[in-house]
Image (cartoon, helix red, strand yellow):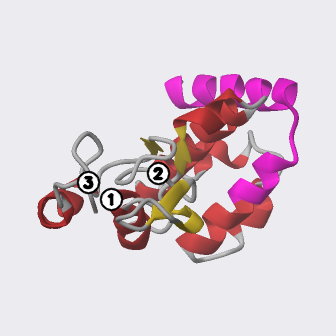
Amino acid sequence: MLGRDDSSLDVTDTITSFIETSLPGLQELAGFVLTTRSPSCGLNSVPVKSTKGRLLKEKSSGLFAQALVDCYPCLPVIEEQALRRDGALAAFELSVIIYSLFKRSCTAEFAAVLPFAHEVLVVNNLMQQMAIVKESLAKLNQTRLSSLLKTLRESIDE
């Protein structure tokens, strides 16, 4: 991976070393916002070019983003530009809260609140559960997402 400001600088080893030392310490995270088109932190938005600038691949993931997703495949992740879409922020927040509750085995907090809770709770695999959450949230509009987020927050605060 070449430096952003100095393309003659190969930063692959530096980034790889950072990934190896930092990823194990991220196990307590419940979500991660990544940087769009970043060679290290882009998620399926990074153009890959040859050293001469020729486009090799239109969309790929940055080294850190790919390592993060590989290490924590259930972790809710999103690129910051994606947060601008209607409902995306609320859906991401809900995913983060639900993921955190799963990790702490606190599923009762959302069982009565989320319309798709039963579908999620009958599955006994975190990866499948989070896939159902993501799919279910994608079907909801901004108003419904905001309402669910508010209700879930109130439920947790009680």
For residue 64, the mark is 1
Residue 1 in picture, x, y percent from top left? 28, 63
In terms of secondary structure, where does tag 3 sit?
Answer: helix
Tell me what residue is drawn at x 46 percent, y 48 percent.
100
> Distance between the Cα atoms at labels 3 and 2?
18 Å
Tell me what residue is drawn at x 33 percent, y 59 percent.
64
The residues colored magenta run 133-157
Eye-nearest disc, 3 or 2:
2
Taking the image as shown, residue 141 lies to the left or right of residue 77, namely: right
Tell me what residue is drawn at x 60 percent, y 77 percent.
124
Indicate which disc, 2 or 1, sits on the residue closer to the N terminus.
2
For residue 101, the mark is none
Taking the image as shown, residue 156 lies to the left or right of residue 10, namely: right
User: Residue 26: which quarter of the image?
Assistant: bottom left
In the displayed orientation, state which residue is furthest to the front. Answer: 52
Q: Are marks 3 and 1 in contact (CB under 8 Å)?
A: no
> Distance between the Cα atoms at labels 3 and 1?
12 Å
**Crowdedness of circle 2 by 10 Å Cα count: few (<14), some, many (20+)?**
many
Question: What's under tag 1, amino acid-wise?
Answer: Phe
Indicate which disc, 3 or 2, sits on the residue closer to the N terminus.
3
Give the main secondary structure of the magenta stretch: helix
Indicate which disc, 3 or 1, sits on the residue closer to the N terminus.
3
User: Residue 71: which quarter of the image?
Assistant: bottom left
As rendered, which of 36 and 144 lies closer to the eye?
36
User: Residue 152: which quarter of the image?
Assistant: top right
> Distance between the Cα atoms at labels 2 and 1?
8 Å
Residue 112 in picture, x, y percent from top left? 74, 43
As rendered, which of 74 and 79 lies closer to the eye?
79
For residue 26, the mark is 3
Q: Which residue is mark 2?
A: 42
**Crowdedness of circle 1 by 10 Å Cα count: few (<14), some, many (20+)?**
many
